[in-house]
Image (tube, rainbow, N blue to C red):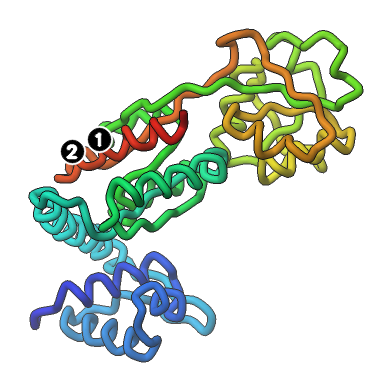
Amino acid sequence: MDNFTLRQLRYFEALAHHGHFGRAADACAISQPALSVQIKELEESLGVTLFERAARNIRLTGFGEDFAKRARAILQSVDELRDLARASRETFSGKLRLGVIPTIAPYLLPTLLRDLGKAHPALDIHVRETLTPRLIEELADGRLDAAIVALPINIPSFTEVPLFAEGFFLVRQKRDAKLPVPTVDELHKERLLMLEEGHCFRDQAMAFCNMQSLAPREGLDGSSLSTLVQMVGAGLGMTLIPEMAVPVETRSAKVAVEALGKGELSRTVGMIWRTSTPLAGQFESIAEIVKAAAR
């Protein structure tokens, strides 16, 4: 077996992740033919086929799946060597790949990115907004450096740093503003609009409202907090949104916003990163910037 390069491993990892030559080539900033050549050379070097190629998609072979696990571990170790050098510098610089869940990103990022830019002007910040399970997967694989999520995550290989707690607010039609605010025990009896499956905020709201399970209901689940608030304004029911979303999502909607009992409904927002990263000290300082931005 001839030698192969780290660059070929990165191209392989991108193709394994995207499952498509065009998307993988875009992610690697090279042409599709160049990517194909590098993958072919890698397979020839190994003497084994890594991908099954079909007309419209590709998939890893059995050996390719085993190879992918080892390749990711190697690439992560290489990235940690790079991060070790970054950690020794006086100025925190280079690429920072930060993940954020959708129920936080629109409300925190404008202030946070401004403050991060001031504190660390040499950082090249890349933001990834997606659901918690995907952020955890990408953080574990080394495709993200850190993420801002709702805690707890309870994964031994991750460091969790709580940043702040925020309450949940009830959003209902304006005509109901004079009615008594439902208690937490009463909320599960109401027509409560929820985010669609996959959002951790949905799971938290269901737990707080004593809802053990809730199948998707046609017309009553939304893909974003903005959609839920507009559905409330249209008279479809009521919903819960986190405190930081209130000024943005309700400023132009015909709804009433009310606090529930003090401390009854809340979530803890925090920052997570791999425990093995050499940049833990830098991420702790960024966590303080996140905390200040949230205030």
Q: Is residue 126 left or right of residue 142?
A: right
In the displayed structure, would residue 245 be above or below residue 277? above
Residue that appears at 59% across and 11% down: 264
The residue furthest front is 118
At numbered mark 1, what does the secondary structure look like: helix, strand or loop?
helix
Q: Which residue is mark 1?
A: 284
Q: Is residue 216 left or right of residue 208?
A: right
Task: Give the crowd class for mark 2: few <14, some 14-19, many >=20 residues within 10 Å.
Answer: few
Amino acid found under the numbered disc labelled 1: Glu
Q: Toward which corner of the image does residue 179 lie, by quadrant?
A: top right
Residue that appears at 48% across and 81% down: 54
At numbered mark 2, what does the secondary structure look like: helix, strand or loop?
helix
In the displayed structure, would residue 231 be above or below residue 184? below
Amino acid found under the numbered disc labelled 2: Gly
Identify which residue, 252 or 150, lies in the foreground: 252
Residue that appears at 82% across and 30% down: 255
Q: Which residue is mark 2?
A: 281
> Where does the image place residue 238, in percent across and percent down from the top left?
79, 27
Identify which residue, 2 or 176, lies in the foreground: 176
Task: Give the crowd class for mark 1: few <14, some 14-19, many >=20 residues within 10 Å.
Answer: some
> Where does the image place residue 138, in percent across and percent down from the top left?
37, 52
> Where does the image place residue 4, in percent across and percent down from the top left?
14, 78
Q: Is residue 200 left or right of residue 66?
A: right
Asked if marks 2 and 1 touch (Cβ < 8 Å), the reply is yes
Residue that appears at 55% across and 44% down: 102
In the displayed structure, would residue 62 be above or below residue 220? below
Q: Toward which corner of the image does residue 276 lie, by quadrant?
A: top left
